[in-house]
Image (cartoon, helix red, strand yellow):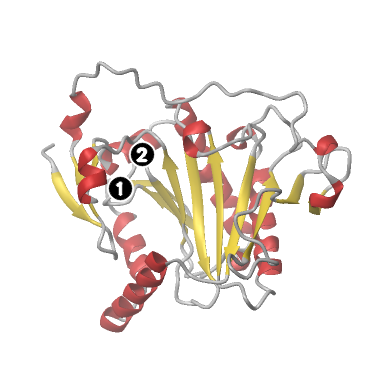
Protein backbone atom coordinates (compact mmCIF):
# COMPACT_ATOMS: atom_id res chain seq x y z
CA UNK A 1 0.00 0.00 0.00
CA UNK A 2 1.37 3.42 -1.01
CA UNK A 3 1.29 6.44 1.29
CA UNK A 4 -2.01 8.31 1.29
CA UNK A 5 -2.96 11.74 2.65
CA UNK A 6 -6.25 11.58 4.55
CA UNK A 7 -8.42 14.23 6.21
CA UNK A 8 -10.50 13.92 9.35
CA UNK A 9 -14.24 13.34 8.89
CA UNK A 10 -15.09 16.92 9.85
CA UNK A 11 -12.12 18.99 11.08
CA UNK A 12 -9.05 20.33 9.29
CA UNK A 13 -6.78 17.60 10.60
CA UNK A 14 -4.56 15.63 8.22
CA UNK A 15 -2.62 12.39 8.44
CA UNK A 16 -0.39 10.52 6.01
CA UNK A 17 -1.03 6.79 6.21
CA UNK A 18 2.38 5.33 5.33
CA UNK A 19 2.57 1.56 5.97
CA UNK A 20 6.02 1.21 4.43
CA UNK A 21 7.41 3.50 7.16
CA UNK A 22 7.07 0.68 9.66
CA UNK A 23 9.87 -1.18 7.86
CA UNK A 24 12.48 1.49 8.64
CA UNK A 25 15.62 0.30 10.51
CA UNK A 26 15.83 1.27 14.19
CA UNK A 27 19.00 1.68 16.22
CA UNK A 28 17.13 3.07 19.23
CA UNK A 29 15.27 0.74 21.57
CA UNK A 30 11.50 1.20 21.33
CA UNK A 31 10.17 -0.50 24.43
CA UNK A 32 6.58 0.69 24.73
CA UNK A 33 5.28 -0.43 28.08
CA UNK A 34 7.04 0.76 31.20
CA UNK A 35 7.43 -1.65 34.09
CA UNK A 36 4.90 -0.49 36.64
CA UNK A 37 5.79 -0.08 40.30
CA UNK A 38 3.10 -1.32 42.68
CA UNK A 39 3.02 0.49 46.00
CA UNK A 40 2.16 -1.32 49.21
CA UNK A 41 0.23 1.77 50.34
CA UNK A 42 -1.69 2.57 47.16
CA UNK A 43 -3.90 5.64 47.73
CA UNK A 44 -6.57 4.20 45.41
CA UNK A 45 -7.06 0.99 47.37
CA UNK A 46 -10.23 1.52 49.45
CA UNK A 47 -8.48 0.92 52.78
CA UNK A 48 -6.22 3.90 52.05
CA UNK A 49 -8.83 6.39 50.81
CA UNK A 50 -8.67 9.76 52.57
CA UNK A 51 -12.09 10.41 54.09
CA UNK A 52 -12.10 14.06 53.08
CA UNK A 53 -11.57 13.07 49.41
CA UNK A 54 -14.47 10.60 49.16
CA UNK A 55 -17.35 11.96 47.06
CA UNK A 56 -19.31 8.77 46.53
CA UNK A 57 -18.88 5.02 46.42
CA UNK A 58 -20.87 2.11 45.02
CA UNK A 59 -21.06 -1.11 47.02
CA UNK A 60 -19.98 -1.84 50.57
CA UNK A 61 -16.76 -1.30 52.44
CA UNK A 62 -14.17 -2.65 52.83
CA UNK A 63 -14.35 -3.42 49.08
CA UNK A 64 -16.85 -1.18 47.28
CA UNK A 65 -17.15 -1.89 43.56
CA UNK A 66 -16.33 1.72 42.59
CA UNK A 67 -15.22 4.89 44.28
CA UNK A 68 -15.43 8.56 43.31
CA UNK A 69 -12.71 10.69 44.88
CA UNK A 70 -11.71 14.32 44.69
CA UNK A 71 -8.46 14.78 42.81
CA UNK A 72 -6.05 15.96 45.54
CA UNK A 73 -3.93 17.80 42.96
CA UNK A 74 -6.51 19.51 40.72
CA UNK A 75 -5.65 21.81 37.84
CA UNK A 76 -9.11 23.40 38.18
CA UNK A 77 -11.43 23.83 41.16
CA UNK A 78 -14.77 25.44 41.99
CA UNK A 79 -13.12 27.88 44.42
CA UNK A 80 -10.69 29.22 41.79
CA UNK A 81 -12.33 31.74 39.42
CA UNK A 82 -9.12 31.94 37.36
CA UNK A 83 -9.27 28.20 36.57
CA UNK A 84 -12.81 27.13 37.39
CA UNK A 85 -13.93 23.53 37.23
CA UNK A 86 -13.74 20.19 38.96
CA UNK A 87 -11.64 17.03 38.78
CA UNK A 88 -12.60 13.61 40.07
CA UNK A 89 -10.91 10.21 40.16
CA UNK A 90 -13.02 7.11 39.47
CA UNK A 91 -11.58 4.00 41.16
CA UNK A 92 -12.70 1.23 38.81
CA UNK A 93 -12.19 -1.77 41.10
CA UNK A 94 -11.10 -2.46 44.68
CA UNK A 95 -8.65 -5.06 43.34
CA UNK A 96 -5.20 -3.51 43.05
CA UNK A 97 -3.92 -6.18 40.66
CA UNK A 98 -6.63 -6.19 37.97
CA UNK A 99 -6.71 -4.05 34.84
CA UNK A 100 -9.97 -2.88 33.29
CA UNK A 101 -9.88 -5.41 30.43
CA UNK A 102 -9.57 -8.21 33.01
CA UNK A 103 -12.87 -7.28 34.69
CA UNK A 104 -16.25 -8.83 33.74
CA UNK A 105 -18.32 -7.16 31.04
CA UNK A 106 -21.07 -6.45 33.58
CA UNK A 107 -18.57 -4.59 35.77
CA UNK A 108 -17.36 -2.45 32.87
CA UNK A 109 -21.01 -1.71 31.99
CA UNK A 110 -21.53 -0.54 35.56
CA UNK A 111 -18.48 1.71 35.21
CA UNK A 112 -20.26 3.42 32.30
CA UNK A 113 -23.23 3.83 34.63
CA UNK A 114 -20.95 5.49 37.20
CA UNK A 115 -19.69 7.85 34.48
CA UNK A 116 -23.32 8.71 33.69
CA UNK A 117 -24.19 9.33 37.34
CA UNK A 118 -21.24 11.67 37.80
CA UNK A 119 -21.94 13.46 34.51
CA UNK A 120 -25.52 14.07 35.66
CA UNK A 121 -24.37 15.37 39.04
CA UNK A 122 -21.62 17.63 37.67
CA UNK A 123 -24.02 19.02 35.05
CA UNK A 124 -26.19 20.44 37.84
CA UNK A 125 -23.56 23.15 38.23
CA UNK A 126 -24.82 25.73 35.70
CA UNK A 127 -21.32 27.17 35.30
CA UNK A 128 -19.95 23.93 33.84
CA UNK A 129 -19.96 23.83 30.04
CA UNK A 130 -17.63 20.95 29.25
CA UNK A 131 -17.00 17.48 30.71
CA UNK A 132 -14.13 15.19 29.69
CA UNK A 133 -14.05 11.58 30.90
CA UNK A 134 -10.73 9.87 30.32
CA UNK A 135 -8.45 7.02 31.31
CA UNK A 136 -4.65 6.83 31.27
CA UNK A 137 -3.01 3.40 31.42
CA UNK A 138 0.78 3.10 31.43
CA UNK A 139 3.51 5.64 32.04
CA UNK A 140 3.70 6.91 28.45
CA UNK A 141 -0.06 7.49 28.54
CA UNK A 142 0.27 9.81 31.52
CA UNK A 143 -0.70 7.45 34.34
CA UNK A 144 0.99 8.17 37.67
CA UNK A 145 -0.76 5.42 39.65
CA UNK A 146 -1.02 1.74 38.75
CA UNK A 147 -4.39 0.95 40.37
CA UNK A 148 -7.06 0.87 37.64
CA UNK A 149 -8.80 4.23 37.54
CA UNK A 150 -10.17 6.91 35.24
CA UNK A 151 -10.88 10.61 35.68
CA UNK A 152 -13.46 13.31 35.05
CA UNK A 153 -12.35 16.84 34.17
CA UNK A 154 -14.98 19.60 33.88
CA UNK A 155 -14.59 23.31 33.11
CA UNK A 156 -16.64 26.45 32.60
CA UNK A 157 -15.48 26.81 28.98
CA UNK A 158 -15.42 24.68 25.85
CA UNK A 159 -11.91 24.08 24.42
CA UNK A 160 -11.49 25.98 21.11
CA UNK A 161 -10.96 22.91 18.93
CA UNK A 162 -14.21 21.41 20.23
CA UNK A 163 -16.06 24.66 19.66
CA UNK A 164 -14.72 24.58 16.10
CA UNK A 165 -15.87 20.98 15.72
CA UNK A 166 -19.36 21.85 16.96
CA UNK A 167 -19.60 24.61 14.36
CA UNK A 168 -18.50 22.24 11.60
CA UNK A 169 -21.01 19.61 12.73
CA UNK A 170 -23.73 22.25 12.61
CA UNK A 171 -22.65 23.38 9.15
CA UNK A 172 -22.70 19.76 7.93
CA UNK A 173 -26.20 19.30 9.30
CA UNK A 174 -27.43 22.47 7.56
CA UNK A 175 -25.93 21.27 4.26
CA UNK A 176 -26.82 17.57 4.40
CA UNK A 177 -29.76 17.50 6.82
CA UNK A 178 -28.12 14.83 8.99
CA UNK A 179 -25.49 14.26 11.67
CA UNK A 180 -22.02 13.74 10.23
CA UNK A 181 -21.26 10.93 12.68
CA UNK A 182 -24.53 9.14 11.95
CA UNK A 183 -23.46 9.25 8.29
CA UNK A 184 -19.98 8.02 9.24
CA UNK A 185 -21.57 5.04 10.99
CA UNK A 186 -23.51 4.15 7.83
CA UNK A 187 -20.30 4.26 5.81
CA UNK A 188 -17.90 2.51 8.19
CA UNK A 189 -20.24 -0.39 9.01
CA UNK A 190 -19.85 -1.58 5.42
CA UNK A 191 -16.10 -1.08 5.06
CA UNK A 192 -12.71 -2.61 5.93
CA UNK A 193 -12.24 -0.45 9.05
CA UNK A 194 -15.13 -2.06 10.94
CA UNK A 195 -14.16 -3.82 14.18
CA UNK A 196 -17.52 -4.77 15.64
CA UNK A 197 -21.20 -4.03 15.28
CA UNK A 198 -24.37 -5.15 17.00
CA UNK A 199 -27.86 -3.74 17.44
CA UNK A 200 -26.70 -1.00 19.80
CA UNK A 201 -23.11 0.08 19.15
CA UNK A 202 -20.43 0.12 16.49
CA UNK A 203 -16.63 0.14 16.74
CA UNK A 204 -14.21 0.97 13.94
CA UNK A 205 -10.79 2.43 13.20
CA UNK A 206 -11.27 5.97 11.85
CA UNK A 207 -10.40 6.75 8.23
CA UNK A 208 -7.73 9.32 9.16
CA UNK A 209 -6.32 7.58 12.26
CA UNK A 210 -3.80 9.84 13.96
CA UNK A 211 -2.56 7.17 16.36
CA UNK A 212 -1.42 3.60 15.74
CA UNK A 213 -4.38 1.26 16.29
CA UNK A 214 -6.76 4.10 17.16
CA UNK A 215 -10.35 2.89 17.59
CA UNK A 216 -13.74 4.57 18.14
CA UNK A 217 -16.90 3.29 19.83
CA UNK A 218 -20.24 4.98 19.09
CA UNK A 219 -23.84 4.26 20.02
CA UNK A 220 -25.98 3.72 16.93
CA UNK A 221 -28.66 5.97 18.36
CA UNK A 222 -27.90 9.67 18.06
CA UNK A 223 -27.12 10.45 21.71
CA UNK A 224 -25.37 13.60 22.87
CA UNK A 225 -24.20 12.36 26.29
CA UNK A 226 -23.59 9.24 28.31
CA UNK A 227 -26.57 9.79 30.63
CA UNK A 228 -28.98 8.70 27.89
CA UNK A 229 -27.34 5.32 27.22
CA UNK A 230 -29.69 2.52 28.20
CA UNK A 231 -28.74 -0.75 29.87
CA UNK A 232 -28.42 -2.73 26.63
CA UNK A 233 -26.25 -0.02 25.05
CA UNK A 234 -23.95 0.10 28.08
CA UNK A 235 -23.52 -3.69 27.98
CA UNK A 236 -22.70 -3.72 24.25
CA UNK A 237 -20.29 -0.81 24.75
CA UNK A 238 -18.58 -2.64 27.62
CA UNK A 239 -18.32 -5.85 25.59
CA UNK A 240 -16.41 -4.29 22.70
CA UNK A 241 -14.36 -1.99 24.97
CA UNK A 242 -13.11 -5.04 26.87
CA UNK A 243 -12.18 -6.76 23.60
CA UNK A 244 -10.30 -3.76 22.21
CA UNK A 245 -8.38 -3.11 25.44
CA UNK A 246 -7.39 -6.79 25.65
CA UNK A 247 -6.00 -6.61 22.11
CA UNK A 248 -4.08 -3.43 22.94
CA UNK A 249 -2.55 -5.13 25.97
CA UNK A 250 -1.38 -7.96 23.70
CA UNK A 251 0.54 -5.28 21.78
CA UNK A 252 2.14 -4.28 25.10
CA UNK A 253 1.10 -0.65 24.57
CA UNK A 254 -0.01 2.01 27.03
CA UNK A 255 -3.28 3.68 26.05
CA UNK A 256 -5.75 6.46 26.72
CA UNK A 257 -9.46 6.53 26.13
CA UNK A 258 -11.71 9.54 26.39
CA UNK A 259 -14.95 11.14 25.32
CA UNK A 260 -16.10 14.75 25.29
CA UNK A 261 -19.43 16.13 26.44
CA UNK A 262 -20.32 19.74 25.69
CA UNK A 263 -23.22 20.54 27.99
CA UNK A 264 -25.15 22.88 25.70
CA UNK A 265 -24.59 21.05 22.41
CA UNK A 266 -27.48 18.63 21.94
CA UNK A 267 -26.43 17.93 18.34
CA UNK A 268 -23.14 16.30 19.30
CA UNK A 269 -22.87 12.53 18.81
CA UNK A 270 -21.30 10.77 21.76
CA UNK A 271 -18.25 8.65 20.93
CA UNK A 272 -15.25 7.21 22.73
CA UNK A 273 -11.76 7.42 21.27
CA UNK A 274 -9.35 4.67 22.30
CA UNK A 275 -5.76 5.71 21.65
CA UNK A 276 -2.85 3.27 22.05
CA UNK A 277 0.39 5.16 22.61
CA UNK A 278 2.66 3.47 20.10
CA UNK A 279 2.97 6.54 17.90
CA UNK A 280 6.21 8.53 17.90
CA UNK A 281 5.78 12.13 16.76
CA UNK A 282 9.00 13.58 15.41
CA UNK A 283 10.07 16.52 13.23
CA UNK A 284 7.35 16.24 10.58
CA UNK A 285 4.51 16.04 13.10
CA UNK A 286 5.84 18.76 15.39
CA UNK A 287 6.90 21.07 12.57
CA UNK A 288 4.02 20.72 10.10
CA UNK A 289 1.16 19.45 12.24
CA UNK A 290 0.68 16.62 9.71
CA UNK A 291 0.88 13.23 11.37
CA UNK A 292 2.53 10.21 9.71
CA UNK A 293 0.93 6.94 10.80
CA UNK A 294 2.66 3.70 9.68
CA UNK A 295 -0.31 1.54 10.76
CA UNK A 296 -3.24 1.88 8.38
CA UNK A 297 -6.69 1.84 10.03
CA UNK A 298 -7.61 -1.04 7.71
CA UNK A 299 -4.69 -3.08 9.09
CA UNK A 300 -5.55 -2.07 12.67
CA UNK A 301 -9.19 -3.10 12.27
CA UNK A 302 -8.09 -6.46 10.87
CA UNK A 303 -5.96 -6.95 13.98
CA UNK A 304 -8.87 -6.14 16.30
CA UNK A 305 -11.16 -8.52 14.40
CA UNK A 306 -8.64 -11.38 14.41
CA UNK A 307 -9.39 -12.74 17.90
CA UNK A 308 -12.57 -12.80 19.92
CA UNK A 309 -10.91 -11.80 23.16
Compare residues 95 and 156 and report the one nearer the observer. Answer: 156
Tags 1 and 2 touching, CB below 8 Å? yes
Give the side of residue 122 with respect to residue 14, left or right.
right
CA distance for labels 1 and 2: 8 Å
Compare residues 207 and 135 and report the one nearer the observer. Answer: 135
Q: Secondary structure at mark 1?
A: loop
Q: Residue at x 66, y 38 (%)?
A: 104
Residue at image mark 1: 209
Residue at image mark 2: 213
Give the side of residue 9 with respect to residue 238, left or right.
left
Q: Position of residue 10 (x, y in %)?
A: 29, 65
Q: Residue at x 72, y 30 (%)?
A: 96
Q: Residue at x 34, y 17 (%)?
A: 29
Q: Position of residue 13 (x, y in %)?
A: 26, 57
Q: How many neighbours does mark 1 have within 10 angstroms: few (below 14), some (14-19), or many (20 or more)?
A: many
Q: How many neighbours does mark 2 have within 10 angstroms: few (below 14), some (14-19), or many (20 or more)?
A: many
Q: Secondary structure at mark 2?
A: loop
Looking at the image, residue 306 lies above or below residue 193: above
Residue 93 in sight from this viewpoint: yes
Looking at the image, residue 267 lies above or below residue 49: below
Q: Position of residue 223 (x, y in %)?
A: 51, 69
Give the side of residue 297 with respect to residue 90, left or right.
left
Number of marks in the image? 2
Looking at the image, residue 197 lies above or below residue 158: above
Quarter of image, res 165: bottom left
Looking at the image, residue 26 lies above or below residue 53: above
For the N terminus, the quadrant is: top left
Residue positioned most to the right: 61
Amino acid sequence: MQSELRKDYIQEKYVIIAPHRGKRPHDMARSERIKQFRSATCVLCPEHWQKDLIIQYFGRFPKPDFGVLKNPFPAVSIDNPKAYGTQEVIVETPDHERELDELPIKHIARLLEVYAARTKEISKNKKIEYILIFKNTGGRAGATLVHSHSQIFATDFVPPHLFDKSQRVQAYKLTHGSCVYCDVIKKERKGPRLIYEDKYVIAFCPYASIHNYEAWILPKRHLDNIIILNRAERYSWAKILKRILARINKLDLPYNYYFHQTIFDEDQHLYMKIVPRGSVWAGVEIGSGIVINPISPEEAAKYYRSHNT
